[in-house]
Amino acid sequence: MTSILIKNVWLDRDTVDIFIEGNIIRNIGKNLDVNAQQTIDGSRKAVIPGLINGHGHAAMTLFRGWGDDMPLEQWLYDRIWPREAKMTEEDVYWGVKLACLEMIKTGTTCANDMYTMFNATAQAATDMGIRMVAAPTIWDFFDKKNTEAAKKQTLQYLKDAQKYSSRITFAAAPHAIYTVSSELLQWSHDFANDHNLLIHLHLAESRTEHDNAVQQFGLSPVRYLHKLGLLSPRLILAHVVWLDEEEIKMLADHEVKIVHNPNSNLKMASGYQFKYMEMKHAGITIGLGTDGCASSNNLDLIEAMKTASLLQKAWRYDPTLFSAQDALDCVTINGAKILRLHTGKIEAGRLADLCLIDLNCAAFTPNFNFVSNLVYAANGSCVDTVICDGRILMQNKQVPGEQEILDRAAAIAYRLMKK
Amino acid sequence: MTSILIKNVWLDRDTVDIFIEGNIIRNIGKNLDVNAQQTIDGSRKAVIPGLINGHGHAAMTLFRGWGDDMPLEQWLYDRIWPREAKMTEEDVYWGVKLACLEMIKTGTTCANDMYTMFNATAQAATDMGIRMVAAPTIWDFFDKKNTEAAKKQTLQYLKDAQKYSSRITFAAAPHAIYTVSSELLQWSHDFANDHNLLIHLHLAESRTEHDNAVQQFGLSPVRYLHKLGLLSPRLILAHVVWLDEEEIKMLADHEVKIVHNPNSNLKMASGYQFKYMEMKHAGITIGLGTDGCASSNNLDLIEAMKTASLLQKAWRYDPTLFSAQDALDCVTINGAKILRLHTGKIEAGRLADLCLIDLNCAAFTPNFNFVSNLVYAANGSCVDTVICDGRILMQNKQVPGEQEILDRAAAIAYRLMKK
């Protein structure tokens, strides 16, 4: 069995050794007397759990900077969809590799991903060594023919999922209530129940979506899902900006999980008044996501933590809200709970997904409060070493093969965006 | 005369050479046929003007993470002021060195700074090689005895200012209307006029400040300054969140300059509805600042650009506002205009303050739109090389002497914060 010993690393105001055996954190303590195949010097470094990106579309790193500062409809219909239609499995594979590279570089070891080409995504994540909940997006645009094709496609992908690493978990992903019929939503729910899967869905992202739901279904988005019987502990909703107190109670009562995407919501101007405080008080588990690079432009969860915290303080006019620790919880222990993974905490017995943070830089000088510095002063560039499932993916800020990924992904992106 | 040739660097969608002679950009063109003392390989790098931080308190890097997630009054009275009272010139010197290090690392070549100990600040900036408009903060708390002391202090510092590098410009800095009497405000204005100096002042930062002004002076902050005769082209106002349309017109009519500090305003929950659009349409020159590290925790202007742009889009519900280029203009050409410097643009004849950005990383892959990637995808860690006043301050992301600065600043901070 492989083993790693991290010596003298800073953890929760103490200096410890961490022993990893196979893919498990086996032991944490002072001066551990163990033999390990690999030893990592943890001095002037802090250890944190590998970060968990609660919502994204990895392949869309290929669209970075391709449609900024424009209205949502123009962005989606003119810039994104016509180019996505041209993408091959090979394109998606390299796009996801680029995303994984960026995530590893910035301390993310696990992504909750939603994209159409499941196999390319799962293969890239397998090859890059990260953990992923990979959900193939389906939609039928309220057309019966598409509904059946989407079901068939999902069943096929579920079979395909056996081919990939145990780090890849399959999930259902009906796209949104404005692109997926009630029949396909309910089928996705039953399908997920039958196979014990998570369901990943965009919801209540923009005011337009909310108002259209009221007009089309006679119900606001959360109430509509409630009526369809979709609210359940296996449901993960991305965004959820537009809802009221009663809907928050519905979500809490059914133990629905929520993923906040602050940078995407700000940049797309979808809505900034995310009701973190009400949801937290209602007992809802809240994670954080970056969304895809077409809408929020990078996959840096350390940046996302800061935006989430500052935004909540700002629109509530209360600097005490959404502390740095709250933000870190969202991308660690909450993320793990949402994705049903035994990660998210540096603790013996948990899966060995963790990062070493380089403290020898301005962002951590002085270091009165490590979590504050991580969230408010640092960004993804402070990550030095990343271990996922007991395997070292990055050391000294270097990921093996990164130049090839940058070059190939760029070449694909330029080809795709040519007229 | 010293000279530097930057070969094959990416500038505005073209690849060029840049020749720097002394402290001036002498020539820009294809395959320049010149001899230079130093040659820099610019391939896979883009050149941008050195960034200009419009508002900060450099010495306060020593307070990073010392008072987060707490109400403003508790933060200021319990955490900041008692510790600041203990600071020596030596402490400030190393605090400012730490700030300069962080600014250089993240592409800032010029800071508009406000702090009490002028000499320590000016000396540190001189030694670190950056450009600085250094203004010694004064306040009298409406007590006549303090008023005279503040005037005397300022006159002394003006004399002292001759001792430092030509990169250091002296400015006047009455702290704020709630700490400085009308007499000292008007004296500062006359003093600045007499010596052709800029004036750096906090204004209309929080709703409390606005409401107190109405109560205490019978006028909102901008109107109060107008009545005192302080509005002028040499006045630089930091924050200015709380004002109305008529006040924007007053500022525009008097060519007052404004510096927006988005991260500080969000984190302190001072106000998020900065009226960038109205001010821009009124013709006001708007810069960006980080504020001090006690309130916004880092000095990364690339991060500040993103926050400023996203925030404006979000609260206006319009993703087309405050484009990436608008954000870059704020920290380059607008900053130069505000500080009356011939910098802020890569152009023959301008002062040689510039940065090379490393394009060989995920944030710039693909690179459809360099400015979008810089603002929305990157952060300060993408800066590879920094030149200020024709001198190389950083190359290959290394600043000479950085370890000593980190170690000494940290030791000082820990000593200061001990009970």
Image (spheres, coloured by chain):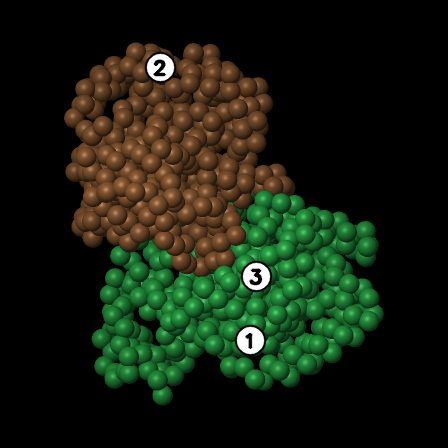
Chain colours: A green, B brown
Where does the image place residue B146, in percent across and percent down from the top left? 26, 18
Where does the image place residue A54, in percent across and percent down from the top left? 54, 64
Which element is circle 2 on? helix
Q: Quadrant of residue B130?
A: top left
Left or right: B311, with A328 as reference point: right
Tell me the amino acid under the disc marked 3. Answer: Arg
Question: Closer to the camera: disc 2 or disc 3?
Answer: 3
Give the class, few, some or many, for how many residues have Cα within 10 Å of label 2's Cα (few <14, many ≥20): many
User: Who's the residue at 52% across and 69% down the image?
Assistant: A94
Task: Report the quarter where the N terminus of chain B lies.
Answer: top left
Task: Report the quarter where the C terminus of chain B lies.
Answer: top left
Tell me the amino acid under the disc marked 2. Answer: His
Q: Are marks 3 and 1 on the same chain?
A: yes
Which is nearer the eye, B336 or B273? B336
Please give the label number shown on residue B189: 2
**Alpha carbons under labels 3 and 1: distance apart:** 23 Å
User: Who's the residue at 49% across and 20% down the image?
Assistant: B251
Question: Closer to the camera: disc 2 or disc 1?
Answer: 1
Please give the label number shown on residue A344: none
Please give the label number shown on residue A122: 1
Residue under pointer 3: A415
Which element is circle 3 on? helix
User: Who's the residue at 43% across and 11% down the image?
Assistant: B229
Where does the image place residue B212, in percent across and percent down from the top left? 47, 24
- Specify the farthest residue to the front: B33
Where does the image place residue B396, in percent across and percent down from the top left? 28, 53
Tell me the amino acid under the disc marked 1. Answer: Ala
Q: Quadrant of residue B104?
A: top left
Which is nearer the eye, A194 or B17? B17
Which element is circle 1 on? helix
